Every structure is written in structure tokens, then in C-alpha cells.
Image (tube, helix red, strand yellow):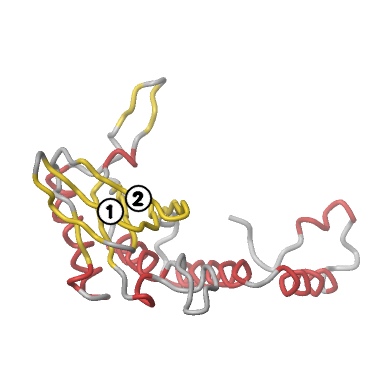
Amino acid sequence: MKAIIQRVTKASVTVGEAQISSIGRGLCVLLGISVEDTQKDVDYMVRKILNLRVFEDENGRAWSHSVMDRELEVLCVSQFTLQCILKGNKPDFHSAMPAELAQPFYNNILEQLRQAYKPELIKDGQFGAYMQVHIQNDGPVTIQLESPRGTTDPRQLFKQEKQQQRREKTRSKGPSEAGREKGTSHTKADPSASIGAEGDISSEPQQ
């Protein structure tokens, strides 16, 4: 599953002359569902959408709060073209889940979001309709997300999630703190390792 998440000051969806839904400040999420997506992808995307820290806190500190922390709105729009594969200059959408399967799948995503958050703050467009999506990007801030592919072994999935959380925690630290940790990791490197291979030494496997 792919998503384009935009921090907005306002956003709305219009079909024909009728406005279907609108939000004030919050997130506008374009979702592209693939033929390979499962409930695991839904769980991942719902968690990330609601917990992504793209808002400031009460003191104005950036990248501190999620949409849930600020109790803001979320507008979701089904966007199968995110699953586009170019063949030359022509878009191919065979990777996108067929509409008859994608609609209940998409409705399930909305339901999971409403259960995990406040139902009245989750809005959506009109599945399958020709929509006009009006987005006033705030920043601009645009985040591209894709649910992880690979093993279905629960132990490996848990390990991958922990590794990702550690990387996100490291990125959220200040440069001086991250630099101290980097220096510490170098002191733990194998003394017998060659200088040329030193850059490959890491506490985590690269993905």
C-alpha cells in the first residue's frame, strides 16, 4: 500500500457541483491499494497516519505532535494511480487492486482509522467517482509512505518494526546527540576491520 500524506490548512473533495467532504487543519491522505495488500498493510498504514509527527507542539517546536495529539481532522481519498507502473510513457495500473475488491478494502481502512481515533474526525471522498480534490498544503509538508514488503514470519516482522522504531528515534534526536551515539558505535567496531570496510559497520542491517 502506498500513501501520500500532506499536512494541510484545509482540504475538500467535490464531485460535480457537490462538495462531498471538507476538513480544516489536519492531514489529507491519498491511498493507493495494491493487489498484494493484506490486513498487515492496513494495520501499518493506519498506525503511521495517526502517529506521524508533522505538527508543532504548544511551544511551537516542530515535528513534535501527531494528528491525534492535536485532535485534528483526516481526509482520506482513494487514489489507485499511486500504484502506477510506467511502460514507456504510458501508465499501467495492473498493480492496483481491482475496484470490486478495493472498495471494501478501502472501507475497512476507514473503519480502522475511526476505531483507533475519533470517528467524526475521519472524512473521505467518494470511492470510484471522478473527484476534484482541493488541497491547501501547509508548509508545504508532504510525506510518502509505503507499507513494508517481505517476510510474514511474526518474529521477523516484530524485529523489522523494532529496527524501524530505533531509526525513527535516532532521526528525531538533535545532531549533537546523534553524533555522540555515532561516535560510540565506532568505538565498538571490530579493531581488526579494515579502514575501507569501516563505513559498512552498523548495529542494524541496511534496508
Please determine whether, in this image, residue 167 is positioned above or below residue 124: below
SS under mark 1? strand
Where residue 4 appears, as percent x and y from the top left, is 38, 50
The quarter holding residue 80 reads top left
User: Can you identify the residue that label 1 sits on?
Assistant: 11
- Left or right: 63 as drawn, with respect to 125: right
Front in this rendered view, residue 41 or 119: 119
The quarter holding residue 109 reads bottom left
- Left or right: 10 as drawn, with respect to 62: left
Inter-mark Cα distance, 1 to 2: 6 Å
Q: Earlier in the sequence, mark 1 or mark 2?
A: 1
- Left or right: 200 as drawn, with respect to 54: right
Q: Name the residue type under label 2.
A: Gln
Question: Badge 1: how crowded within 10 Å, few (<14), some, or many (20+)?
Answer: many
Disc number placed over residue 136 in the picture, else none: 2
Q: Name the residue type under label 1.
A: Ala
Question: Badge 2: how crowded within 10 Å, few (<14), some, or many (20+)?
Answer: some
Front in this rendered view, residue 119 or 95: 119
SS under mark 2? strand
Please determine whether, in this image, residue 195 is positioned above or below residue 71: above
Query: Where the C terminus falls, by quadrant?
Result: bottom right
Residue at the image position 24 percent from the left and 51 percent from the top: 77
Residues tagged 1 and 2 counted as in contact (Cβ below 8 A): yes
Where residue 100 appears, as percent x and y from the top left, is 12, 45
Front in this rendered view, residue 32 or 136: 136
Where residue 122 appears, as percent x and y from the top left, is 22, 66
Front in this rendered view, residue 134 or 64: 134
Please determine whether, in this image, residue 19 is positioned above or below residue 56: above
Where residue 200 appears, as percent x and y from the top left, is 76, 56
Residue at the image position 29 percent from the left and 34 percent from the top: 93
- Left or right: 127 as drawn, with respect to 172: left
